[in-house]
Amino acid sequence: MKLFDPGITPKLLTALDGTPITSQEAWASIRRPEIVEMLTREVYGAAPGRPDNLRFDTVVNDGDALEGKAVLKTVTVSFEGPYGSWSFPFWMFTPKHDQPVGALLLICIGTKEDKLDITRKVKSPAWPVEEIVARGYAAVAFHYESLAPDNTECFSHSVHSCFSQQRSGDSWGAIAAWAWGAMRVMDYLQTDPDINKSRIGVVGHSRGAKTALLTGMLDTRFSAVFSNNSGCMGAAMTRFKGGESVAQINERFPYWFCQNFRKYDDDVLAMPFDQHMFLATIAPRLLYVSSATNDEWADPDAELTAVKLAGEAYRLYCMNGIRDTLYPVPDKSYGGAGIGYHRRTGPHGLQVSDWMHFIDFLDARW
């Protein structure tokens, strides 16, 4: 990580017109909307709203899944846009309980067959269904490429093609499309009587974590957001980041973001934002960021810096974040009233231990 310099860091609690933001009301009505609009226009792109013709088709695959501990459902989300129709599935294991339960929605990246085996013959640490259900939460997941492929064919063979035929500077990128899918899953979860609608969190790893953060920024129905190893244009500060840079991420994955973002490739100091502002849009809902000790490409120190700075927004709600002086002991979780953090020993990846930290954080607050 480069040396942190507050003098070149955009001020989280100063409005674009220079007005200091000193109250919850000013944050909610002035500063947060400014940040959301700026990041939408300049980085992630503007996605459409909920389709009027959204449909859900639910199949109960197993009423006694996980040795009778859960109900397994497959839900297909379908809709029509001006230029075509689309559908995608998601899966949920809901623990059997006499009251509605909280839910954790994973935006799953990687190989679907390895990560989302609903037969549970293949058990990935990235989606530890058994452990999540044992802790009393519904384990919900969809595969990100069911909305848009993670390659340069993104805009012609994806949900994008249902809504537009041309791209402008602020047209939504792949990350916004994946987040849009998570919001459609939330539309269903709001209708499921077995789910506690006020206790739904979204979880992501790597590019999926960037997506989870964007989902939380755009959809305040998610009451908790979990970002694991999200790195560049996720939870890590851009101005003071080692590892992956804006120029490098745009060169490798130009379709992740809107076209407007390319203008910052060689001049990140010109950005009127940085990622502490992205994290702060979750306030006053729960935010948890996790890093890994060997993940230099994501830069865990830059992630921790953004977490600390985002705490300014939480303090407006009398919710403490992460101490400014904290340097974490690996594998230990740190949490304030609104923000949690841990740094797992090891490389880039999402492990069962990360999930257990997430759920410990929720249990202490929910």
Image (tube, rainbow, N blue to C red):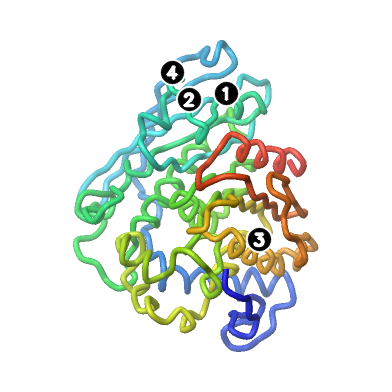
What residue do we see at 53% from left, 69% from top? 241
On screen, residue 113 above or below 282 = above
On screen, residue 117 above or below 142 = above
Tell me the residue that label 4 is attached to. 121
Q: Nearer the viewer, mark 3 or mark 4?
A: 4
SS for callout 3: loop
Q: Amino acid at mark 3?
A: Ala
Q: Considering the image in quadrants, where does the N terminus appear? A: bottom right
Q: Amino acid at mark 4?
A: Lys
SS for callout 4: loop
Q: Which of the two discs, 3 and 1, labels the residue nearer the N terminus?
A: 1
- How far apart marks 3 and 4 lie (CA) works out to 39 Å
The residue carrying pointer 1 sits among few (fewer than 14), some (14 to 19) or many (20 or more) residues within 10 Å by Cα, namely some
Q: Amino acid at mark 2?
A: Lys
Q: Which of the two discs, 3 and 4, labels the residue nearer the N terminus?
A: 4
Q: Which of the two discs, 1 and 4, labels the residue nearer the N terminus?
A: 4
Tell me the residue that label 1 is attached to. 130
Tell me the residue that label 2 is attached to. 123
Tell me the residue that label 3 is attached to. 283
